[in-house]
């Protein structure tokens, strides 16, 4: 079982692949992020599909991305020589192409290739043949063609080759997907495709605004977000993988290859703060197109084209990563009620307007319909931000985001010349604030708790100051930070909640610490005036990325390894947000909590 942190991401803004330090592409969903994988060894074994390209002999391997790009270089040193493998998914092509170029650096190295194609998540063996000298595999709707000068041959339902690379020599491989009914020749010029891809990424990342000493981490994070963006529509997937477990051997294995409304404001802020207004507008427009229709049917997540049916299935032929089952395709959480999504949607419009991207008449009309629905439904219990599979409850953060919806609606009317029942919205905002302050605050703990009347803590309450519900210096917020530090910290990192308690989420299995929550803690500490602690935690989190700067969703502090789907947009978003909050005000443009209008009277407290 290859550790999750041993993988690097290859992406083309349509599909994504994961390649291990040892040279095996163990995951590739193509032609879309949510397509069935043609390489699924990540969730099983080599016979479930992979593309191995590595020295035959034992090697010491190091790797890095070329600056500002998703072009990966891995250097393998053996007893006889050194080679470099340069690889990428070619940027901005309608038909995804995986390019790998072996370059001899010193001496000679014996290389081995093993290509095992198994379409439909490792379950379908293709028909393999040669067509005009090119290797081609076809099954059902999918086809792959490989262009290379290396002679390959079949062996035990796989394709293999052994070859020698000398210093100064280049050996190219280009593996391209095509719909089986419409084959197309793969371009063999691997070196040119790599350079073209690098130029495209470097030109994009050159626009990242400075962020003090954390520019490198922020750049890698926003670059990862762009890699997880489906270019034809602007939808951003939460991760390019499914079913990487939150605890090895457990059942918390979800499909994250979809677009969450929950991430909407964080995504918009990360893009705007980093200088990517066009990309932020594209994401906002995707969101508005996708949620159009009956606001009563607003979902928590959608497909990259805005699809609503994300039926959850068990892929029972796959043994799972480290035996973690079930392996899932689809996510039934799309049927849940999560009231926080309404707040995120309205906040997206507000944050965009603050940056000069004002809502059109049609957009505001949709927003008002959404607010009408929320006006009727905010008193209902829901499944909450963590998508619990137990009973519905009145989750604190859900109610706080309901407050956000009406707070931002008031601000949009007051400051951006939009029309609406502002007096009614203002009254609703104040009513929600009063109810949350009374029913979610646990005086015995001195903290906001997970849901009304609960004794359980929830790290999501760290967002209370970030969204402007209360100042970070409010005694209740300070008490919440202190309580979470007492009860939800493991080795200095933050758990979401007591995941072992089945009454909370309907599962009751342990999980790792939650990396986004740990970044939220750093941000909350900074806002609360505890700058030294905030910086120390943030610096530690920066150091927990893998060797190429990527994060998963969770972390196992006992075994010092990443857990959960990888790389995870939510974690990279939280990193960008915390980086801008911890940066000096003169360089930080992320100020969601510092709204341009005066605070309501109930937020004006003596400090």
Image: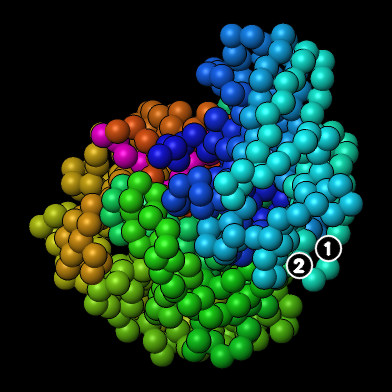
Indicate whether residue 418 is drawn in magenta. Answer: no
Give the residue number, with chain letter if any, for mark 1: 183
Cα–Cα gap, marks 2 and 1: 6 Å
Relative to the observer, which residue lies in front, 517 or 168?
Answer: 168
Label 2's element? loop
* Most foreground residue, 125 or 525: 125
Residue where numbered disc 2 is placed: 180
**The N terminus is located in which quarter?**
top left
- Marks 2 and 1: CB-CB under 8 Å? yes
The stretch of residues the image draws in magenta is 549-558
Q: Is residue 386 left or right of residue 201?
A: left
| Residue drawn at (72%, 50%) of the image | 12
Q: Residue at x 51, y 49 (%)?
A: 47
Horizontal and vertical percent for residue 603? Answer: 37, 62
**Residue closer to the observer: 57 or 405:** 57
**Apparent side of residue 433 relative to residue 449 in the rendered image (left or right):** right
Q: Would you identify the image quadrant in which residue 185 lies?
A: bottom right
Please name the residue shown 45% across and 28% down the image. Answer: 543
Please count the marks in the image.
2
Instruction: Determine whether, in the image, residue 29 is placed left or right of residue 316.
Output: right
Residue 551 can be seen in this image: yes
Viewer-proximal residue, 122 or 263? 122
Helix, strand or loop status at disc 1: loop
Q: Main secondary structure of the magenta part?
A: loop
Query: Is residue 554 magenta-colored?
Result: yes
The x and y percentages for residue 345 are 55, 72
């Amino acid at each position: 079982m290859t550790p999750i942190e041993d993988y690097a991401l290859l992406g083309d803004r349509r599909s994504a692949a994961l390649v291990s330090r040892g040279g095996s592409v163990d995951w590739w969903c193509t032609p879309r992020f949510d397509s069935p994988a043609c390489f699924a060894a990540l969730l099983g074994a080599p016979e479930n599909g992979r593309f191995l390209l590595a020295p035959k002999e034992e090697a010491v391997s190091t790797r890095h991305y070329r600056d500002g790009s998703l072009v990966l270089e891995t250097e393998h040193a053996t007893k006889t020589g050194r080679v470099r493998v340069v690889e990428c998914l070619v940027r901005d092509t309608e038909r995804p192409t995986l390019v790998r170029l072996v370059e001899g650096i010193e001496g000679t190295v014996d290389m081995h290739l093993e290509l095992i194609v198994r379409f439909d998540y490792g379950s379908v063996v293709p028909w393999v043949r040669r067509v005009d000298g090119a290797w081609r595999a076809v099954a059902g709707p999918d086809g792959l063609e490989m262009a290379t000068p290396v002679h390959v041959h079949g062996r035990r339902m796989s394709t293999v080759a052994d070859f020698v690379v000398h210093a100064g020599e280049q050996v190219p491989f280009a593996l391209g997907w095509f719909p089986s009914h419409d084959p197309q020749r793969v371009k063999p010029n691997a070196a040119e495709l790599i350079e073209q891809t690098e130029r495209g990424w470097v030109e994009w990342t050159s626009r990242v605004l400075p962020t003090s000493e954390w520019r490198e981490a922020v750049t890698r994070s926003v670059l990862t977000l762009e890699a997880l963006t489906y270019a034809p529509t602007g939808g951003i997937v939460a991760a390019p993988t499914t079913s990487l477990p939150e605890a090895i051997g457990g059942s918390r294995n979800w499909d994250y290859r979809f677009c969450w409304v929950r991430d909407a404001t964080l995504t918009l802020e990360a893009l705007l703060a980093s200088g990517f207004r066009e990309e932020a507008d594209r994401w906002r427009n995707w969101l508005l197109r996708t949620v159009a229709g009956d606001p009563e049917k607003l979902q928590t997540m959608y497909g990259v084209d805005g699809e609503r049916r994300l039926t959850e299935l068990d892929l029972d032929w796959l043994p799972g990563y480290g035996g973690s089952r079930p392996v899932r395709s689809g996510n039934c959480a799309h049927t849940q009620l999560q009231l926080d999504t309404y707040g995120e949607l309205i906040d997206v419009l507000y944050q965009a307007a603050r940056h000069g991207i004002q809502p059109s008449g049609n957009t505001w009309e949709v927003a008002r319909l959404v607010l009408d629905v929320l006006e009727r439904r905010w008193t209902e219990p829901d499944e909450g931000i963590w998508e619990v599979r137990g009973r519905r409850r009145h989750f604190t953060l859900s109610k706080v985001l309901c407050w956000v919806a009406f707070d931002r609606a008031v601000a949009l009317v007051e400051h951006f010349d939009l029309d609406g029942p502002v007096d009614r919205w203002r009254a609703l905002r104040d009513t929600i604030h009063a109810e949350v302050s009374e029913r979610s605050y646990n005086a015995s703990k001195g903290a906001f708790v997970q849901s009304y009347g609960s004794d359980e803590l929830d790290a999501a309450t760290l967002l209370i100051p970030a969204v402007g519900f209360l100042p970070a210096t409010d005694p209740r917020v300070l008490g919440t930070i202190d309580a979470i530090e007492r009860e939800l910290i493991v080795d200095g990192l933050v758990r979401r909640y007591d995941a072992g308690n089945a009454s909370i989420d309907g599962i009751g299995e342990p999980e790792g610490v939650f990396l986004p929550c740990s970044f939220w803690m750093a941000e909350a500490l900074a806002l609360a005036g505890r700058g030294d602690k905030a910086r120390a935690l943030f610096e530690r989190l920066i150091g927990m990325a893998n060797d190429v700067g990527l994060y998963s969703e969770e972390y196992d502090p006992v075994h010092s390894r990443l857990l959960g789907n990888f790389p995870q947009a939510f974690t990279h978003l939280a990193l960008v947000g915390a980086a801008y909050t911890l940066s000096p005000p003169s360089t930080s443009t992320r100020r969601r909590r510092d709204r341009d209008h005066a605070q309501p009277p109930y937020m004006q407290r003596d400090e």
